[in-house]
Image: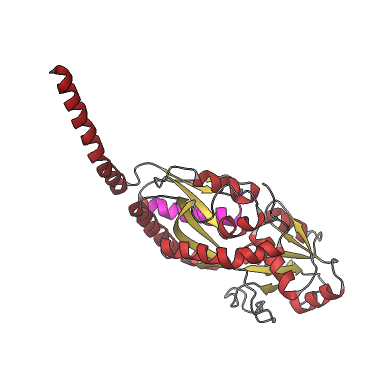
């Protein structure tokens, strides 16, 4: 009898535990977040993605009534930080300040990418897009982009452009320029946008590919001259700078975006909570972001997933043709 009683109690206890699992998950979603959230930035401190992430994280913390700790895990073209988040528990407490490079550029450059650009993540929300621009120093012989392109055609390989590194959005902008304008300009990669900018200003490279927010202060001070912008429309902060489209390259577009994502399999209720907080944070900081040259995006998790899927079928194949053969990290 005692043995039978123990079996009955164990069976009843197991049934109770099984039936309680959905309730536990629901309770977790309902009480989320009840401890600090980690937001991983896959770049070094001070990078554009890092700056935006910290600004948005502060406002999201206020909205969620919980601390969001920003943690930098840079290296290997953002693959280290991205892979870390992809392998984390999908409970909403480990997030990624992600970029177009993580999902769209890296599949074109790395042969052994340690995550799937779409399946390994749960998109939360797009944040901002940033227009990439081409600049020369103020003492440059080139006053316009047309002059620079014309010179490059006659002197292949003589000019150079600096970027934040092989596989970066700044590198993609330069390679797209070479592709559509049919010119040979040497790419000089650096470990980040800041060292690329400093060497450019020191005269070690002809031209710089950068976010407008990065070159803005140098353009205003007269140290640099912005020749062209990669977005489809002119920038409100630089209305006199022509777009590459206006210069005769209708397919050119080097706008790049950032967003927030988590590991695959995050509960929909938590994704919805984070999405609402991210969109509220964007509205709270819209004026500052726009003053720094960003375009506020926001939107739904589904829209972000659709963007990634679309660009994987359009942008990634083109970059595979423009960049060297896929390499190991």
Q: Is residue 292 above or below residue 151?
A: above
Q: Position of residue 281 (x, y in %)?
A: 42, 59
Q: Position of residue 236 (x, y in %)?
A: 57, 75
Q: Mainly helix, strand or loop, the magenta region?
A: helix
Looking at the image, which residue is at 52% across and 47% down? Answer: 40
Q: Is residue 279 visible?
A: yes
Q: Is residue 59 magenta?
A: yes
Q: Is residue 103 magenta?
A: no
Q: Is residue 84 above or below residue 126?
A: above
Which contiguous range is marked in magenta?
42-62
Residue 227: which quarter of the image?
bottom right
Quadrant where the N terminus is found in the figure: top left
Q: Position of residue 100 (x, y in %)?
A: 57, 60
Q: Position of residue 162 (x, y in %)?
A: 74, 60
Q: Is residue 222 visible?
A: no
Left or right: where does residue 127 sit relative to residue 20?
Answer: right
Left or right: where does residue 220 sit relative to residue 309?
Answer: right
Left or right: where does residue 119 sit relative to residue 225?
Answer: left
């Amino acid at each position: 009898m005692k043995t039978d009683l123990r079996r009955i109690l164990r069976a009843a206890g197991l049934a109770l535990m099984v039936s309680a699992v959905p309730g536990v998950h629901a309770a977790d979603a309902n009480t989320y977040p009840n401890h600090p959230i980690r937001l991983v930035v896959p770049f070094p401190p001070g990078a554009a993605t890092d700056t935006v992430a910290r600004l948005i994280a502060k406002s999201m913390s206020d909205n969620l009534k919980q601390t969001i700790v920003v943690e930098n895990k840079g290296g290997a073209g953002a693959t280290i930080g991205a892979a870390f988040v992809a392998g984390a528990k999908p409970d909403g407490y480990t997030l990624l300040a992600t970029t177009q490079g993580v999902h769209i550029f890296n599949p074109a450059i790395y042969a052994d990418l340690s995550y799937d650009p779409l399946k390994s993540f749960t998109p939360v929300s797009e944040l901002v897009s940033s227009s990439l621009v081409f600049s020369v120093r103020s003492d440059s012989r080139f006053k316009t982009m047309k002059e620079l392109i014309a010179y490059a055609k006659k002197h292949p390989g003589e000019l150079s452009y600096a970027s934040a590194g092989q596989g970066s959005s700044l590198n993609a902008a330069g390679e797209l320029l070479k592709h559509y304008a049919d010119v040979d300009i040497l790419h000089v990669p650096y470990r980040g946008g800041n060292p690329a900018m400093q060497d450019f200003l020191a005269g070690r490279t002809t031209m710089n590919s950068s976010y407008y927010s990065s070159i803005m202060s140098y353009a205003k001070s007269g140290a640099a001259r912005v020749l062209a912008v990669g977005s489809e429309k002119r920038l409100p902060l630089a209305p006199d700078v022509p777009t590459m489209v206006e210069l005769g390259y209708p397919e050119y577009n080097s706008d790049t975006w950032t967003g927030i994502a988590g590991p695959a399999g995050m509960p929909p209720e938590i994704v919805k909570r984070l999405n609402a907080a991210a969109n509220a944070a964007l509205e709270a900081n819209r004026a500052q972001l726009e003053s720094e040259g960003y375009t506020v995006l926001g939107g739904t998790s589904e829209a972000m997933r659709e963007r990634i899927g679309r660009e994987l079928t359009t942008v990634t194949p083109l970059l595979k043709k423009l960049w060297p053969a896929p390499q190991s990290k």
